[in-house]
């Protein structure tokens, strides 16, 4: 009865008229863009009750603990895992995590790009950095995969685009490592000092966000840098809480990251940004970008901006404090 | 039907009205139409990855975009302007009741009103609707129950004794 009454309030007259009026323009605007492409494949695990294991692991286990148990079937009444609950549980895990100490922040990242339809180029890069000095490892394990012969032929005919430059092991002499987060150029020392206070971190994000960019989407884009950086655990926890409060999040609770590690994939409402998180440790496993290609922008002299393209994914193989390799 | 543009056009035709109806809760018509246009543009970019039943996803995207609006609250006057015309014998009574219902909906907590609208307008399951509302299914069920009760109580004919 009440539902029927509420249903009768639906503005059908206006929506019908608007559909007629807007249809041609809306469709033309969409079709002016490049056709949609499938995201890089995220292999699915067999459904196995991972849902319950993930929820429990966030709450119960110390972050350094590796949980490799197969959980019991999901009992009736188990709370439904949502993107929000996953992010909030991750924040709690980070807050309980004892901070690591070390001299060099070490990152090993496998990058996947899609220079052409049906083509994926993968390579691994590694850095050790103390804010001034350190080492940049050679680009390794470059692999190109194709969805078929046709894609491979096209890629070869177009001069093998997307292959990373072959680099050698080198020091940071004369180089400064900085990350572009929106309008801010951020160095390691800045990341270490990022505030853990919710309002202060939100203000920092708002200040960095380019005009007109969606706040939720920007927070996701910033998260890929901050969550894998030497930012304090409390700061990273606060960032997860900010992400949790975004509307329209989508959770894939049985995803794998681009290198095959199981995780929980959380996509923002625009669909442009996906974070794959390890539920046991709240560690960011991977970031997948599926928005429009970024355009290069002017940067200060001596700096280079690497615009991110649709279909790019980063798998964070290692990140944490360490010594320089021998 | 394999052509992506044809399939996307079909998606647009099937769901435009629903997404706009939802956007009109929180924005004036021009702004709501822009939000819906943007929502479908995002859907086109993500077309290969859309879930098989895309309406909850579309409403979730629209909801996020609407949050950027300066005045995104549910307003009675806005909803009254969109009230559909019904040609039934007891037009006057129905209009009065529907106007009263709109005013009650607009006056209650927005999350409660949204819960009732999402389920009754679109036939979404509580779980689907909870995802759009960004809350747990249990929380959503509480909101829905509270909204139904408030609306029922507000529209219940009152006795003289209750009014005194």
Image: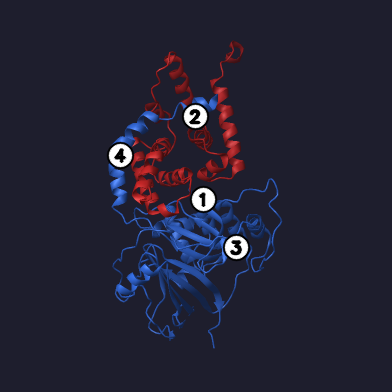
Chain colours: A blue, B red
- Residue that numbered label 2 is attached to: B105
User: Does the CB distance between marks 4 and 2 fall below 8 Å?
Assistant: no
Quadrant of residue B79 within the rendered picture: top left
Identify the residue at horizontal 51%, vertical 26% (top origin): A4
Label 4 Cα crowd, 10 Å radius (few <14 / some 14-19 / many 20+): some
Q: Secondary structure at mark 3?
A: helix
Q: Chain of mark 2?
A: B
Q: Earlier in the sequence, mark 3 or mark 4?
A: 4
Q: Earlier in the sequence, mark 1 or mark 3?
A: 3
Identify the residue at horizontal 39%, vertical 82% (top origin): A166
Q: As drawn, is A213 to the left or to the right of A264?
A: left
Q: Chain of mark 4?
A: A
Residue A269 spot, x, y in % from top left: 45, 51
Q: As drawn, is A81 to the left or to the right of A180?
A: right
- Residue that numbered label 4 is attached to: A22
Front one among A302 and A305:
A305
- Residue that numbered label 3 is attached to: A94
Please determine if labels 4 and 1 lie on a single subunit.
yes
Residue A199 spot, x, y in % from top left: 49, 54
Q: Chain of mark 1?
A: A
């Amino acid at each position: 009865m009440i539902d029927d009454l509420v249903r009768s309030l639906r503005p059908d007259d206006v929506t019908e008229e608007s559909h007629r009026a807007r249809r041609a323009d809306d469709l033309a605007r969409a079709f002016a863009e490049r056709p949609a492409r499938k995201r890089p494949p995220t292999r699915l695990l067999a459904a196995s009750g991972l849902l319950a294991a993930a929820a429990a692991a966030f709450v119960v286990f110390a972050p350094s603990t590796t949980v490799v148990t197969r959980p019991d079937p999901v009992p009736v009444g188990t709370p439904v895992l949502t993107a929000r609950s996953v992010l909030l549980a991750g924040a709690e895990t980070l807050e309980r995590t004892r901070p690591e100490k070390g001299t060099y922040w070490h990152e090993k990242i496998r990058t996947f790009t899609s220079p052409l339809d049906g083509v994926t180029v993968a390579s691994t890069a590694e850095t050790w950095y103390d804010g001034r000095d350190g080492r940049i490892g050679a680009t390794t394990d470059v692999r190109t995969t194709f969805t078929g012969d046709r894609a491979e032929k096209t890629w070869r005919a177009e001069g093998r685009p997307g292959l990373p430059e072959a680099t050698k092991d080198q020091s940071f002499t004369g180089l400064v490592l900085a990350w572009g987060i929106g309008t801010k150029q951020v160095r390691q020392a800045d990341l270490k000092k990022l505030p853990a206070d919710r309002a202060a971190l939100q203000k920092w994000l708002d200040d960095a966000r380019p005009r007109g960019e969606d706040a939720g989407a920007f927070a996701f884009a910033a998260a890929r840098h901050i969550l894998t950086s030497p930012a304090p655990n409390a700061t990273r926890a606060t960032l997860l809480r900010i992400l949790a409060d975004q509307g329209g999040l989508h959770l894939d609770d049985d995803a794998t990251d681009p290198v095959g590690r199981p995780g929980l994939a959380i996509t923002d409402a625009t669909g442009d940004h996906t974070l794959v998180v390890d539920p046991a440790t709240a560690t960011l496993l991977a970031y997948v970008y599926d928005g429009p290609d970024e355009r290069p922008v002017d940067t200060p002299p001596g700096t280079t901006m690497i615009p991110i393209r649709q279909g790019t994914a980063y798998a964070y193989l290692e990140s944490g404090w360490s010594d320089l390799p021998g | 039907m394999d052509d992506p543009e044809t399939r996307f056009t079909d998606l647009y035709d099937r769901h435009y009205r629903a997404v706009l109806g939802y956007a009109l809760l929180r924005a004036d018509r021009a702004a709501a139409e822009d939000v819906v246009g943007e929502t479908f543009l995002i859907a086109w970019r993500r077309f290969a990855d859309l879930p098989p039943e895309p309406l909850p996803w579309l409403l979730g995207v629209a909801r996020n975009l609407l949050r950027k609006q300066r005045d995104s609250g549910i307003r009675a006057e806005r909803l009254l302007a969109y009230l559909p015309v019904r040609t039934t014998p007891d037009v006057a009574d129905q209009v009065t009741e529907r106007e009263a219902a709109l005013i009650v909906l607009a006056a209650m907590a927005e999350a409660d009103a949204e819960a009732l609208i999402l389920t009754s307008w679109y036939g979404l399951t509580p779980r689907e609707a909870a995802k759009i509302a960004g809350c747990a299914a249990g929380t959503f069920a509480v909101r829905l129950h509270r909204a139904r009760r408030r609306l029922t109580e507000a529209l219940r004919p009152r006795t003289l004794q209750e009014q005194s």
